[in-house]
Amino acid sequence: MIRRTRLPLFAISVAALVFAVTTPAPAELPEAFQRWNEPIEPFGIAGNLYYVGTNEITAFLFATPEGHILLDGGFEETAPLIRTSIEALGFSPADVRILLNSHAHVDHAGGLALLKKWTGADLVSSRGDKPLLEAGGEEPYPFPPVSPDRVIDDGETVELGRTLLTARITAGHTPGCTTWTTQMEVDGKERTVVFLCSVNALPEMDLLSPNPAYQEGRIRAFERSFELLDELPCELFLGAHGSFFLLSEKREQLRSGGYNPFLDPELCRRHLEAKKTRFEEEVARQRAAQEERGDR
């Protein structure tokens, strides 16, 4: 049986101090990424779910009696911060049995190889993102390659110690971008927890050109993802970036007690609506640019 070290309040405060003093600074990252990778004190979100990521790049730990599940690995430079956060909570990284990934970009998959090495956990990945993980991403932001131990498709599940997560493939941002969902009792009621991958249509993404990774095209992949997410219940809203769900603000609210602030279906819907509008604007911009080039 996996046991958590039960720390008294004094020990927890000391662990937090040690975390702040000894956690290594992310010195090798570009400046823009460093601003996303600042260490913060880990904390419990609800039930057996804990936050072990940085100020912007998220990572989540499900602690169970049979071992732990870790969702996302951040940058390569984030991996030591995640390990330190797990230890600061009184858990052992060696008890992580399963690694999950939201998507194969450097800021979410860069630390997976190190975390897999340290924990010996099995890595579970979507079929669409498996080639990117094995290749170490894409330029200009490659990361250490890592091979999944299990490949999943839309609707498949991962289970450990009565924690059951369902993979919903929300492609577009990457070919296998995976939004993970689970059920959890929060504030006395069973809730749907959503860990949104990303539906950001970035300007550098070529949405118009044929891409073998997207069978029906990248635009249709995004459209299908928005259709799926529109129908998906979203009560406790989390995601691949802290800014998606107002991490800093919600963490402070959680400390005040009372209603769990991460229960915010309205924020979830507003976020999706804003990203859908942004996607439509980006498609229109790229089409206009394509037409302008064709007129010359």
Image (spheres, rainbow, N blue to C red):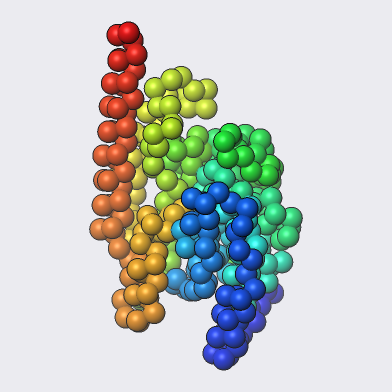
Asked whether 206 or 134 is in front, the reply is 206
Residue 239 point in image, percent of width and height: 43, 55
The quadrant the N terminus occupies is bottom right
Q: Residue at x 48, y 27 (%)?
A: 214
In this view, 257 is above or below 85: below
Q: Is residue 287 left or right of residue 209?
A: left
Q: How many marks?
A: 0
Residue extending furthest toward the top: 296
Is residue 238 in view from this perspective? yes
Residue 275 point in image, percent of width and height: 31, 43
Asked whether 169 or 241 is in front, the reply is 241
The quadrant the C terminus occupies is top left
Q: Quadrant of residue 126?
A: top right
Q: Residue at x 37, y 55 (%)?
A: 244
Asked whether 95 or 58 is in front, the reply is 58
Q: Residue at x 44, y 71 (%)?
A: 45
Is residue 101 in view from this perspective? no
Residue 4 point in image, percent of width and height: 63, 78
Residue 90 point in image, percent of width and height: 62, 78
Q: Residue at x 49, y 50 (%)?
A: 32
Q: Is residue 147 left or right of residue 186?
A: right
